[in-house]
Amino acid sequence: MNLFATVLTYAAPSANYRGESAENRAVIQKIAKGNLEYAIISPEAIRNAIREHLRRMGLPCNRERLGDEDQLAVKFDDYPDPDRFADDFFMGWLVAAGDSDRKKITKALQTAGRDPARFSFRRDSILRMNMAVALEPYRHDTVFTQSPAQVGSPWKNADKSQLLHRETTYTAYQYPCALNLDDCAAHQDWTRTLLQVIGELNEVAGNHARSYFEMAPASIVVRLTKRLVAGFDTYGFRVDGETHRLPELVADLREGDYPGDEFLLGGRIVKDMDDATRDALEKQGVTLERSPQRLLETVADRAGLTPARR
């Protein structure tokens, strides 16, 4: 059984995923769609936040983000072990090691009582993700803030006051993710917690001292299927004013182009539905839920995932 999902966040001012700065200008990373540019958030940033949330939910995690270094830095407690660590299990790993390093690692594993024959130096991620892309194009909005001069202080970051220039956009983001639930069979309780994390995701992308942008779903569409592809546009959300829509998928579901009982829709997209659309989808077997978090609980139940241990 495969799980495919697309998450749509709420819209809010966003200045929290930045590329290289030009002088004092913080530049939002973007990609082009057609003739316009759209802000993006990388899957690596989302995955990093998922790791930290798994830890907060009480699951054992190998990698820890270090916040007080002179560059981006992480620490691993041990060599990767998908049986011990939830983040290794879901995210995979790469241990870049030549022949001599591999021999040292093999010896270290033996000393620790681990079977080197069961260790691999790389494993692909079970959780598949793609970029979060803004729904609204970047319109060259910027804001300025003033960093004051530090006078008579025991420390200072600059010799004089600084004018900070930040690119900003007001938008929602959508991003897809996928899981092969058969690959998750060994840790069903961890997988259930992972779905809970996706429903409560926050602190995804930098600049937390200034910005607060939630990546939890305002709307979500999930497909549970034996098929190997989602089969629908995983960037299909549209926003019409304050209304969330999935125009192509909803039209196809109404026409019976997909098995409706494989689809679950939750959040604002359900709240914004007219009665005729709701009735038509329910007749096709589509599950509709006003709360994205409750919808993910339903997904976990339908997938037969055991409750998380506490």
Image (tube, rainbow, N blue to C red):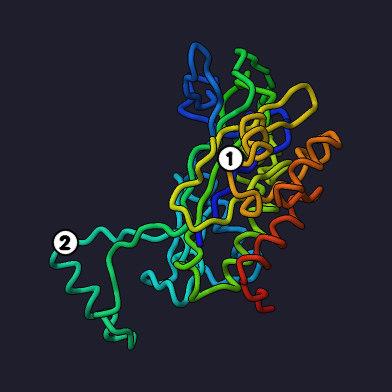
- Cα distance in 3D space between marks 2 and 1: 51 Å
Which quadrant holds residue 101?
bottom left
Q: Is residue 167 above or below residue 102?
A: above
Mark 1 — residue? 257
Disc 1 residue type (three-letter)? Asp
Mark yes or no: residue 207 visible: yes
Determine which residue is flagged by label 2.
98
Taking the spot 51% from the left edge, 64% from the top edge, the residue there is: 181
Decide if residue 202 is on the left or right side of residue 105.
right
Find numbered disc 2 in the image and state the secondary structure of the residue it sits on.
loop
Q: Residues within 10 Å of mark 1 (few under 14, many from 20)?
A: few
The residue shown at (71%, 26%) is 239
Q: Residue at x 76, y 48 (%)?
A: 282
Q: Nearer the viewer, residue 182 or 134?
A: 182
Under circle 1, the secondary element is loop
Q: Is residue 112 above or below residue 164?
A: below
* Percent of width and height locating residue 48: 52, 51
Residue 118 lies in quadrant:
bottom left
Q: Which x, y percent locates residue 60?
A: 55, 72
* Number of the front mark, 2 or 1: 1
Instruction: Say which of 147 and 254 sits in front.
Output: 254
Mark 1 or mark 2, which is nearer the start of the sequence?
2
